[in-house]
Image (cartoon, rainbow, N blue to C red):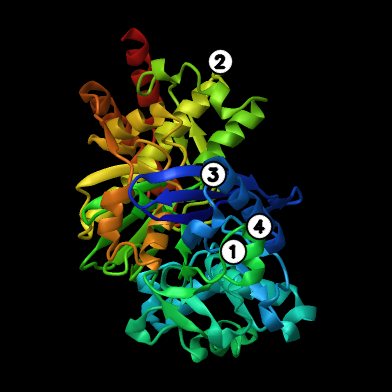
Amino acid sequence: MAVVAGVDFGTLSVRVTLVDSQYGPIGTASASYPLHRRREDPDFATQSHADQMAALAVAMKDALAATGISGGNVEAIALDTTGSSVIPVGEGLEPLDEYYLWCDHRAHAEAEEITTRANASGLEAIAWCGGVYSHEWGFAKLLHWLRHNPGKRDLFVTALEHCDMVAATLSGVKSVNDLKRSVCAMGHKWMWNPKWGGLPTEEFLVSVDPLLAGVRAKMGGAYLTSDKVAGHLTGEWAEKLGLRAGIPIPVGAFDAHWDAIGSHIREGDVVNVVGTSTCIIAMARDAQLVPGVCGVVPGSVHPSYTGIEAGLSATGDIFEAIAQRAGTRVYELSKGLESFKPGQTGLLRLSWDNGDRTVLVNPELGGVTLGWNLVHTAQDELYAAIEGTAFHTRIILERMAEHGVRVDRVINGGGIPQKNEVLNQVYANVLSKPVLVPAGTPTSLGSGIMALLAAGIYKTIEEAQNAVCLPLRIVEPDRRSAEVYERLYALYKDVYFALGQRHAPALPLGRVLPELREVAAEARLG
């Protein structure tokens, strides 16, 4: 028996799970940190590295106390984070600013410039990230920071993804040459791929903006998969965390990718990591490009496979916003939703409140709800939003399948499916196939699995998964509900592509509202 620590840095809190090599998760604790928003700029979202590291110390000590495990008996610690959450640093890898969090969307213009230039120059990398570079990703955020912080440009040494920053901090890395960078992070968000020699060329970056001159050379360090070790815990941080100095820290990754590992992903599975946003994760021995899918990266998710990432820019965020506008919480607003029938609200809700991550990759979009009348309630909108996120997920899964990605099983991971059975049933009905749900929260369990590998307790990810992953329960689709959703999905798909693209071909949408009313009337009649 051996114990390791898996750490997951989320949007609002960090979770630590202690994982026993034989019994799986044995205890967990979390600690929150502030998300800095600005009312006058809804695209602004940053966080402090110091706040996050302080929260990690609290959560780790609470997890140790709750389980009675001595910190000296913890054999390794692994960390996953949100992404692309980017921090510019100076000498000694000290932060020059706060993280541009994944949900910071200020870099719209920069992303569009990168996309335009990449397509005009025939840059191969742009095809591997769906043909569009996102405002959520690294180079766009770094260019935005360089443009808006002229007084700090001379201090800039490099930029790091969140997962690489926390690993460097805990292992005492102070120079770029000693950095270990995550292939997962750099491949999905910075257009890195060994196929074309790593990052895009200096010539390309300068053609986007001369401010990027020299940046490629500054993004040094070793680019590694997560079966490699990033460093070992320093004495300073061992004391702060209550652990033993010298334990290994594997190269980190994004939370959704390791959540998929913790959800027992295998080739042919698609894992919906449903949280604040949704990341849709798959992996394949052989993968081709998928138009509109934001990342196809060798060595991400699982070091021996090509990782495939897509998703929704907002899911739980939408549910929370609906509840807040109603002056309540999602838990309270959800009471009674289990009695709702497919389409009974007469509403069709598109999940574009944070833009479209996949397959349109369009940050200019906003949430759309069709079919309102004067007696609709916030609860109606919440149910329609759950249906809408399921429809959007189906759009993505169909696009992946069209381009050779196997979708044999669908697993609903992340934090929301364990707390919202209505969502699981709606997803099964909309997708018209069984949805598997871990019997417990897999968040940070994937980190625990990677820590078990780093400690040498298991030789392969599959061995560790078989030992510690939670059982999967099955939510079967209801045939009659699935038939109703086939009808509604046809409407959703038309509206999605007609409204989501600036130059979409003309499409008659006059039937949408009448059919929504018809479906709702049929649902009321039973």
In the picture, measured across the screen, residue 56 lies left or right of residue 263, that is right
Q: Amino acid at mark 1?
A: His
Looking at the rendered structure, the kind of residue marked 2 is Val
Question: Is there a contact, CB below 8 Å, between mark 2 and mark 3?
Answer: no
Q: Amino acid at mark 3?
A: Gly
- Residue 306 vs 335, above or below: the answer is below
Identify which residue is drawn at 33% across, 8% down: 525
User: What x and y, as percent, mark residue 455?
Assistant: 40, 66
Q: How far from the left and from the top, in percent, is residue 421?
A: 39, 28
Q: Is any part of residue 490 visible from this angle?
A: no
Q: Secondary structure at mark 1?
A: helix
Residue 410 drawn at (x, y percent): 27, 44
Tag 4: residue type?
Gln
**Image-quadrant location for residue 160:** bottom right
Q: Nearer the viewer, residue 27 or 507?
A: 27
Location of mark 3 (residue) = 68
In front here: 106 or 421?
Answer: 421
Front: mark 4 or 1: 4
- The disc label shown at residue 52, or none: 4
Residue 387 location, quadrant: top left
Gap in angstroms between the C-alphas marked 4 and 1: 26 Å
Residues at badges 3 and 4 in contact (C-beta under 8 Å)?
A: no
Per the image, label 3 sits on a secondary structure element best described as: loop
Q: CA distance from mark 2 to mark 1?
A: 37 Å
Please say if the residues under marks 2 and 1 sit with CB atoms less than 8 Å apart. no
Which comes before the other along the chain, label 3 or label 1?
3
User: Which of the numbered marks, if any, corresponds to residue 375?
Assistant: 2
| Residue identified by numbered label 1 | 108
